[in-house]
Amino acid sequence: MSAIKNSIFLLAVAVVFMTSGCLHYTLKDTAISKDIKTIRINYIDNRARYINPQLSQQLTDRLRQKINNQTNKTLTQGEADLDISGTITDYSFTTAAIADNRSATNRLNVTVHVKIVNRLDEKQNKETDVTRSFDFDANVSIQQAEQSLNESILKNLSDEIFNSLFSNW
């Protein structure tokens, strides 16, 4: 019985060593070219009709933090191998559900237009829109909804932007 356990252990160790020499850094279905050493995250500008005054800075900081924590790349303020910029293009409220002829649930829609410039491989340049919706009770004011949804907005948008940028290289 112990011979089987030893064989399984040795097989697992062999698999780890064989896969450790890959040419890409991968994490949760993301792949970042080994050649990319530096990344610059520019300030995410807010050009939506309705402006949440804290969202631009908070989202920029959260995205920088996520890239810093989940990649081995160096963040820089100067010229970088990857230059990432974004603009909040939509921040709007709509009715999501009606009950008894009145709004029961409202929805906050947020869209961020993201642009990535790869200075090492122009074919990897891309632009994309990331949109997320957040429902809240219609009896809550917009300011209360923003406050209670803030952490969810930052987490979901930074995750979505990160996945959009670093998936399918």
Image (tube, rainbow, N blue to C red):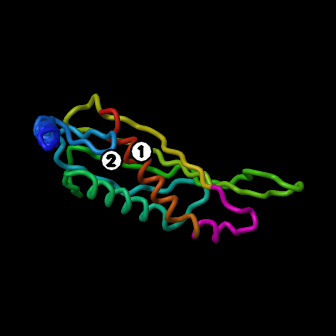
Q: Disc 1 marks which residue?
A: 114
Position of residue 15 measured from the top left corner of the image (x, y, whole percent): 15, 36
In the rendered structure, the answer to whether residue 120 lies left or right of residue 87 reads left
Under circle 1, the secondary element is strand
SS class of the residue under badge 2? Answer: strand
Based on the displayed image, in which of its 4 quarters is residue 1 positioned?
A: top left
> Please, is residue 144 above or below residue 93 in the view?
below
The residue under label 2 is 84
The question of residue 59 being in magenta is answered with no
Tell me residue 102's x, y (percent): 85, 57
Is 16 situated left or right of 71 in this image?
A: left
* 69 is higher (above) or lower (below) than 120: below
All told, the count of numbered labels is: 2
Q: Tell me which amino acid carries mark 1.
A: Val
Contact, mark 2 vs mark 1 (Cβ under 8 Å): yes
The segment highlighted magenta reads 135-147
Q: Quadrant of residue 19?
A: top left
